[in-house]
Image: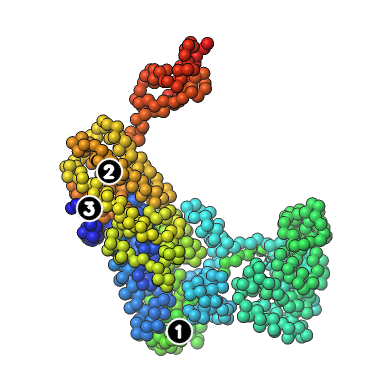
């Protein structure tokens, strides 16, 4: 037993924990619940040490909470539908996406089990299993029933490499979030979830999420993008047509000197005069191949073409030219704008370029008339009829009312958030439960016919076309309404639909006849601690919030936010780059476990730095942690035989020497610190440092005191509490030492140690000495000294002698435990 060889016992304890089901959440428990959730992975291969870091963060929380007496739910599963499985099938030709997925899950499960994470494996789920996706389809049907799932023809993001459409949330700077290919725009008929109905609620409820990182909330807020303003109608000269615009600045209406519509707008055709057609065609062609995101970005060059038509400004009947311009987005507002070059930077740039009139309508107190650039500050109204002289913010409100009175406009709240495009032209996903009938049109699959099974006998070809499209048996169905000939929808759902509700299914993962039991779900949720990557700040977290709100609205659950606390962890880097298979800089957990054991791996990935920060993997850092555990082990074996029989319930720890006092104080201040570090801020790295310090302290006690004089009761206390606190981080060595000490129960089922305030008290007090109110020195006194004793010591103190010598002592004033003021005269 001399040598620390973790490989000897790590597997053993993992098996004991599993056999005794110690990590299964208790049913009908009196304990307070704690739902601890880690974002489930996409099973795309093997996991690396970066994943181990995420799972260990969650594991420390779960194990700690269990020791604090909570009934902990800590489940695991797989987000197992998705493109990579299908791409692997296409590439390798002969492997089915399901086979590929299940094989990866097998590997990942084994890997995770070898790290000893305390998952409740009885609740394991995967989104690609029929028993799961049946309920994803059911949610779709509920949405459909409520008018929240609908199909529309619209320009959509198309990734030519993934050969499927993408939601706006999956397009990052104009590129496919997954494969980084430039996204194209295609006109397609697609299914959407009407998340925009929840825009306001998704925004205002962010305020409830006090324990979410501020940056995540800001990202969601910006994504939802609420703007308050007005819609205003502009007549087109010589036509019945009206152009509606959305503006956040109705106060600038008198400064409108042109209008602009988006190149995609159907208005373009009717507005463009014969003599402008050719020029316009050329321009539209050029724009159509421009990146939609780049062309509207801030620094992008503004371009446009005059349509030949004019609009009438409804506030002053002025005739203004109508342009088609590249910086107008078709999808936002009304796809057309009233342009105010004096007060909007983009309009200013455009007006300069095309020599359009610029008229200032807002001024600072002593402002100039000429403008070098757009004036975007607040100020006072000028050139604006009866509103002149007012502050523009005040005028804005009045102008909106005035517009409404005159029936030329109305107040309008506008969101950037678009509806969630959920159809995908791919095979490996949840089939959308819809049937098309020539007689009845679009017919939802009746609930009792769920699941719409994904057929397994499919062939992939290199074109990337979904094999469902040509699958006769899948496609040809009878209409559930009229019994006539019908065909199935062949699109599958975005995998973000699958992951938008999995945290609910963990509660009843095997339930057959219901999505879940509402009572059970209401008891366990919201999730107390959610942990995952910041890359999900918008996508997954927004969709989950939406689905939760929807399920509340149909009375299935009684809460409207799924995740009470959110922690976003940093990533692991190696050789300066994010760990990834494609970069070839992946460290596999197996390598590390084989060499040092999993406790070293787990402790190292948390010791590496604050868990919310990115960190760089470093081999010598691993060595350092291994040395710490090794030394601890060796220390224990110096005294473990001597403390085996001691039961702390039956003995009293008597502290006699200074060394004993100091060791015990160190122990209890560490309990205090560790509790704070774990509970409050996930400061696991400093918690581990604290353990290293205590280890040193223990070491020096053992080595500096003669073996016969060891305070064994104290050693027992230190030894027990130390491994208890070590156990969330390095549970295997903790469990082994715990048993070597003679404990019969499992450490993972033991209580977290408590601070003994008495032990924290210092031996010595530091007393400040004043003479006639002036600071003259300080002195250490035993903390149990009486007031008389302290005064006596103070008066004898060398440093104060010269201030009191030969003088008359009037009195001494004692401020308990802090200060003695000596008052002298003469
Ligand atoms: C006149 C005006 C004057 C505007 C002014 C701004 C400043 P946010 O805050 O992002 O909602 N806009 C409206 N629809 C647009 C579209 N489809 N494409 C490009 N720009 C569009 O922005 C609202 C403002 O962006 C609107 O207010 C409109 O310009 C422009 F001194 O109207 B504003
Ligand atoms: Zn029919």
Is the residue 502 above or below the residue 786 in the image?
below
Residue that label 2 marks: 699
Residue that label 3 marks: 736
Indicate which disc, 1 or 3, sits on the residue closer to the N terminus: 1
The one of 415 and 596 positioned closer to us in this rendering: 596
**Can you tell which of label 1 and label 3 is closer to the viewer?**
3
Image side of residue 459 versus residue 241, left or right? left
The answer to whether the beta carbon of the residue marked 1 is less than 8 Å from any atom of ligand 2 is no
Is the residue 84 above or below the residue 52 in the image?
below
The answer to the question of whether label 1 and label 3 lie on touching residues, with beta carbons closer than 8 A, is no
Residue that label 1 marks: 464
Indicate which disc, 2 or 1, sits on the residue closer to the N terminus: 1
**Can you tell which of label 2 and label 1 is closer to the viewer?**
2
**Can you tell which of label 2 and label 3 is closer to the viewer?**
2
Q: Position of residue 630 (x, y in %)?
A: 27, 52
Residue at 38% x, 81% y is 89
């Amino acid at each position: 037993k001399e040598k620390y060889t973790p490989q000897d016992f790590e597997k053993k304890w993992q098996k004991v924990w599993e056999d005794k089901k110690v990590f299964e959440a208790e049913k009908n428990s009196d304990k307070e619940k704690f739902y601890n959730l880690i974002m489930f992975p996409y099973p795309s291969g093997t996991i690396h040490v970066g994943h181990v870091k995420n799972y260990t963060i969650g594991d420390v929380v779960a194990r700690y909470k269990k020791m604090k007496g909570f009934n902990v739910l800590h489940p695991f599963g797989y987000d197992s539908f998705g493109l990579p499985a299908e791409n692997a099938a296409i590439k390798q030709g002969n492997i089915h996406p399901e086979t590929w997925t299940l094989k990866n899950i097998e590997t990942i499960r084994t890997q995770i089990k070898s790290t000893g994470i305390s998952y409740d494996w009885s609740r394991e789920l995967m989104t690609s299993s029929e028993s799961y996706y049946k309920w994803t389809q059911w949610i779709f049907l509920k949405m459909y029933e409520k008018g929240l799932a609908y199909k529309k023809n619209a320009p959509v993001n198309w990734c030519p490499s993934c050969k499927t459409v993408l939601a706006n949330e999956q397009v990052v700077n104009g590129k496919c979030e997954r494969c980084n290919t430039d996204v194209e725009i295609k006109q397609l008929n697609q299914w959407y979830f009407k998340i925009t109905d929840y825009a306001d609620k998704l925004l205002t409820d962010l305020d409830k999420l006090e324990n979410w990182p501020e940056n995540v909330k800001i990202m969601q807020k910006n994504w939802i993008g609420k703007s308050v303003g007005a819609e205003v109608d502009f007549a087109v000269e010589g036509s019945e047509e009206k152009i509606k615009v959305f503006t956040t600045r109705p106060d600038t209406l008198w400064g409108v000197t042109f209008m602009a519509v988006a190149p995609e707008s159907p208005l373009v055709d009717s507005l463009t005069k014969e003599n402008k057609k050719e020029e316009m065609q050329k321009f539209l062609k050029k724009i159509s191949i421009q990146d939609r995101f780049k062309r509207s970005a801030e620094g992008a060059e503004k371009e446009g073409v005059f349509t030949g038509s004019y609009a009438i400004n409804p506030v002053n009947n002025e005739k203004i030219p109508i342009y088609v311009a590249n910086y107008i987005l078709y999808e936002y507002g009304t796809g057309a704008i009233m342009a105010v070059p004096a007060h909007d930077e983009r309009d200013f740039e455009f007006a300069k370029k095309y020599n359009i009139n610029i008229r200032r309508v807002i001024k600072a107190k002593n402002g100039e008339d000429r403008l070098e650039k757009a004036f975007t500050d607040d100020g006072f109204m000028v050139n604006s009829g009866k509103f002149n002289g007012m502050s523009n913010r005040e005028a804005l409100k009045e102008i909106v009312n005035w517009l409404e009175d005159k029936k030329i406009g109305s107040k309008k709240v506008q969101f950037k958030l678009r509806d969630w495009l959920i159809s995908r032209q791919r095979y490996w996903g949840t089939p959308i439960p819809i049937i098309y009938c020539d007689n009845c049109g679009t017919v939802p699959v009746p609930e009792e016919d769920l699941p719409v099974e994904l057929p397994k006998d499919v062939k992939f070809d290199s074109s990337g076309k979904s094999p469902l499209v040509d699958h006769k048996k899948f496609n040809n169905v009878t209409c559930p309404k009229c019994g006539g000939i019908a065909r199935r929808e062949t699109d599958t759902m975005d995998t973000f639909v699958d992951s938008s509700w999995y945290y609910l299914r963990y509660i009843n993962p095997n339930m057959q006849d219901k999505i879940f039991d509402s009572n059970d779900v209401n008891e366990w949720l919201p999730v107390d601690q959610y942990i995952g990557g910041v890359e999900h700040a918008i996508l997954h977290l927004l969709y989950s919030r939406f689905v939760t709100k929807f399920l509340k609205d149909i009375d299935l659950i009684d809460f409207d936010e799924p995740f009470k606390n959110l922690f976003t962890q940093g990533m692991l880097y190696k050789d300066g780059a994010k760990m990834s298979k494609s970069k070839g800089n992946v460290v596999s957990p197996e390598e590390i476990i084989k060499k040092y054991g999993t406790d070293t791996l787990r402790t190292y990935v948390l010791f590496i730095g604050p868990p919310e920060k990115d960190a760089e993997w470093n081999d010598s850092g691993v060595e350092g942690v291994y040395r710490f555990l090794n030394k601890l082990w060796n220390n224990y074996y110096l005294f473990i035989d001597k403390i085996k029989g001691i039961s702390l319930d039956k003995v009293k720890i008597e502290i006699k020497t200074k060394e004993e006092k100091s060791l015990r104080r160190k122990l209890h201040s560490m309990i205090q610190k560790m509790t704070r570090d774990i509970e409050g801020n996930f400061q696991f790295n400093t918690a581990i440092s604290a353990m290293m310090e205590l280890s040193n302290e223990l070491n020096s006690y053992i080595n500096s005191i003669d073996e016969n004089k060891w305070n064994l009761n104290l050693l027992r206390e230190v030894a027990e509490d130390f491994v208890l606190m070590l156990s969330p981080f390095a549970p295997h060595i903790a469990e082994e030492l715990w048993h070597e000490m003679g404990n019969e129960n499992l450490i993972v089922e033991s209580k977290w140690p408590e601070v003994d305030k008495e032990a924290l008290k210092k031996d010595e007090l530091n007393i400040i000495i004043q003479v006639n109110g002036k600071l003259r020195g300080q002195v250490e006194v035993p903390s149990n000294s009486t007031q008389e004793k302290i005064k006596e010591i103070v008066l004898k103190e060398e440093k104060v002698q010269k201030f009191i010598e030969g003088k008359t002592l009037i009195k001494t004033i004692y401020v308990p435990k802090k200060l003695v003021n000596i008052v002298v005269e003469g």
